[in-house]
């Protein structure tokens, strides 16, 4: 197979080891505060914030570097509720009825994951 020439990233910015450590620690601090949320605020989110989040999400790498992502912004409360109901049905089905590929039953048995949020949090 022919070797493909390396194409450098034009806006790549290199950081010192100290800066990398600082940035990585800040990133970890932000991510470790994440939790799955089942109840949401009814306060509106500025459209520009949504657009920036979608732009960031659209840069997620993938194997073919094609970014085949599809995003939908839903603002109608009734449609959001329908989506939630269907998503929770699917989640329940996944955890309770689908064939257990990839060792999910093992993780459940070992207490490493659960359908209960409170039991998941005890591991962190």
Image (cartoon, rainbow, N blue to C red):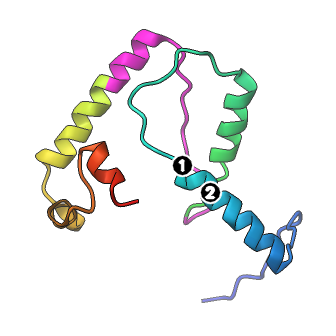
Q: Could you tell whether 95 is left or right of 28 in the image?
A: left
Q: Which residue is mark 2?
A: 29
Give the tally of numbered discs: 2
Q: Residues within 10 Å of mark 1 (few under 14, many from 20)?
A: few
**Residue 91 can be seen in this image:** yes
Tell me the residue at 31%/44% (across/down): 117
Tell me the residue at 29%/23% (across/down): 85
Tell me the residue at 36%/24% (across/down): 83
Q: Is residue 86 above or below residue 110?
A: above
**Which stretch did the figure color magenta?**
63-84
Q: Could you tell whether 36 is left or right of 64 in the image?
A: left
Q: Position of residue 27 (x, y in %)?
A: 66, 58
Q: Which residue is mark 1?
A: 33
Q: Quadrant of the N terminus?
A: bottom right
**Residue 8 can be seen in this image:** no
Q: CA distance from mark 1 to mark 2?
A: 7 Å
By secondary structure, the bulk of the magenta-drawn segment is best described as loop
């Amino acid at each position: 197979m022919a070797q493909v020439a390396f194409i450098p990233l034009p806006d790549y910015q290199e950081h010192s080891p100290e800066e990398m450590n600082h940035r990585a620690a800040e990133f970890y601090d932000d991510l470790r505060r994440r939790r799955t949320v089942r109840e949401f605020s009814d306060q509106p989110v500025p459209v520009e914030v949504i657009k920036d989040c979608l732009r960031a999400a659209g840069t997620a790498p993938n194997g073919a570097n094609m970014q085949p992502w599809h995003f939908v912004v839903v603002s109608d409360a009734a449609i959001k509720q329908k989506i939630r109901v269907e998503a929770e049905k699917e989640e329940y089905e996944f955890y309770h009825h689908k064939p257990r590929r990839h060792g999910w039953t093992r993780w459940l048995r070992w207490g490493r994951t659960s359908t209960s949020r409170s039991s998941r949090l005890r591991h962190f």
